Image (cartoon, helix red, strand yellow):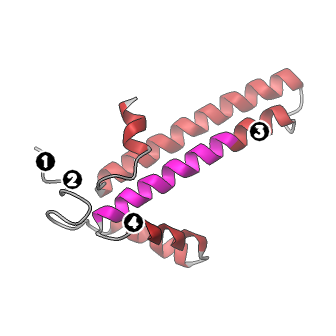
Amino acid sequence: MELINEIYTTEGRLNRLRYFKYYLILVLVSAVIAFVVGFIGGFITGNPESILVKVPGGIISLITSIGGIMLGIRRLHDLNKSGWFMLLLLVPLVNLLFLLYLWFMPGTQGYNRYGEDPLANQY
């Protein structure tokens, strides 16, 4: 439950390493769940294109997308930027540069308007 609370919140800051870690966990877990649900739904109905497969798959995709957006907002907070910058993901080509920015730019050192430096409390 603690991991879910870490992913599905927009409060605070998230450094690069935790952003990678949480995003990878989110994608892997949702992929496994989607595979299992799709397999079971396809097995029950005999049709992998049935509504019993598509609706749960869509719900899983929505939940994963919301988690990814929330992680991105916290990463932007570490960069001392507003979460509204996540809307740049909707702009073709700009979204690729924006993702590189999220992945590789170091966060602001010290306290910023979104909270303490997440690296300050590491041992």
* Percent x, y of residue 49: 86, 39
Instruction: Classify mark 4: helix, strand or loop.
Output: helix
Q: Amino acid at mark 1?
A: Asn
Residue labelled with disc 2: 118
Instruction: Classify mark 1: helix, strand or loop.
Output: loop
Q: Nearer the viewer, mark 4 or mark 2?
A: 2
Instruction: Classify mark 3: helix, strand or loop.
Output: helix
State whether the magenta stretch is mostly helix, strand or loop.
Answer: helix
Disc number for residue 102: 4
Between 34 and 120, which is closer to the camera in this rendering?
120
At 38% across and 35% down in the image, what residue appears?
3
Label located before the other in sequence (4 or 1):
4
Find the magenta span and give its range. 59-78
Mark pair 4, 2: CA separation: 15 Å
* Percent x, y of residue 87: 53, 70
Q: Amino acid at mark 3?
A: Val
Residue labelled with disc 3: 55
Mark pair 3, 4: CA separation: 31 Å
Mark pair 2, 1: CA separation: 6 Å
Disc number for residue 107: none
